[in-house]
Amino acid sequence: MPDPLFEARIRAQRYWFRDGLEEITLGIIFLLMGGWTLAQSKEAWFVPGTLIYMLLLLAFAIFVPRIKTALRERITYPRSGYVDQDGGSWLKGRLARALLVATLGLVVTGAAVLALRYAGVASLDLARMVRWVPAVGGIAVCAMSVYVRVRHSLVRFLVVGVFALILGVAASIEYPPTLAFAIFIVGVGCAWLCSGGVTLWNYLRTVPASADET
Amino acid sequence: MNSRLRQIGDLDRVIHEPARLMIVAMLYLVKETDFLYLQGQTDLTKGNLSSHLGKLEEAGYVEIEKTYRGKIPMTVCRLTNKGRASFKAYEAALRGALF
């Protein structure tokens, strides 16, 4: 018999994905990173470009919680209400998840290196390994998306995950490393933006705002 | 009579009422929430939800804060430490008696 408290907790967590703002934020971060990667490939403006993008990323990372709260105050709270997850356990959960992702990243990288070595696809020289970074990135994004899909039953995450996986592998095979990485990052960013945009549009269309007290 | 089943008689009656149980269970899972979210999750009418929140506040289980989001009033509800402990004890007692 499913635990009703566990189900209610999952429902409360799913609240954060209702309006698509999380995906839009993720999409913007990916696009900024894509721009940074492109900036690195152009040597003429390497230093200023990198600096500008690092500053943009930093500013975005600092202000993104405030921007999201301000947007939610106007969009989400009047429609779905306001909910704040438990700060303490949320932080513990976040740390645990960060550790899990880091461990998973190490395992995936190690497995990829071993697979490449034993399959004879490439020796362990850096240039050849860098080529497969977008593919490994695609696997990581796909793994994260599958986790969200399973945990929160959100199919759109799976679609973005599969797209990231295909794009990562295709870009690794078809393009030189820097361009492949930029294509991967920008492509995934666009996918998150599209997914978040459609979700937000659908949310605004289907959930009316309450003009009354909340 | 089975001693485990007898524990059901000792359940906290403030929490045991179904509507209040829904409210307390919802609040137990989050740090704080507003009236609209609670209403959406529990499917109670405004009057009903208001009345049950009042009873829970009276028992010291829930803290209610009236604030503003722009010009619209916002009622923020959170479980007190006493409410959290009572719900934990209620859950343990019910599980102990039935499972």
Image (cartoon, coloured by chain):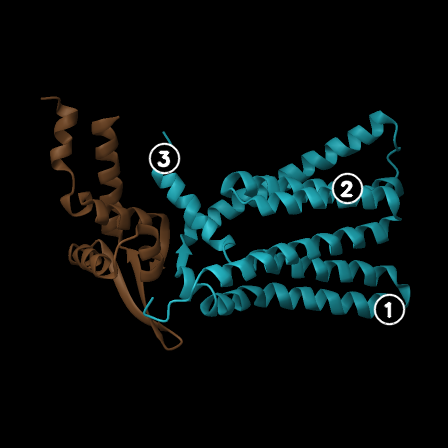
Subunit that carries the residue with mark 2: A
Tell me which amino acid carries mark 3. Answer: Asp
The quadrant of the rendering that contains the N terminus of chain A is top left
Q: Residue furthest bottom?
A: B71
Subunit that carries the residue with mark 3: A
- Number of the label disc, if any, that sits on residue A135: 2
Cβ atoms under marks 2 and 1 closer than 8 Å: no
- Number of the label disc, if any, that sits on residue A45: 1
Could you say where residue A43 lies in the image, as x and y percent from the top left?
A: 90, 64
- Number of the label disc, if any, that sits on residue A3: 3
Whether callout 2 and callout 1 share a subunit is answered: yes
Within 10 angstroms of label 3, few (less than 14), some, or many (20 or more) residues? few
Q: Quadrant of residue A34?
A: bottom right
Residue for point 32% across, 69% down: A213
| Colour of chain A as rendered | cyan
Tell me which amino acid carries mark 2. Answer: Ala
Residue for point 88% across, 63% down: A42
Residue for point 41% across, 57% down: A84
Mark pair 2, 1: CA separation = 28 Å
Q: Quadrant of residue A196?
A: bottom right
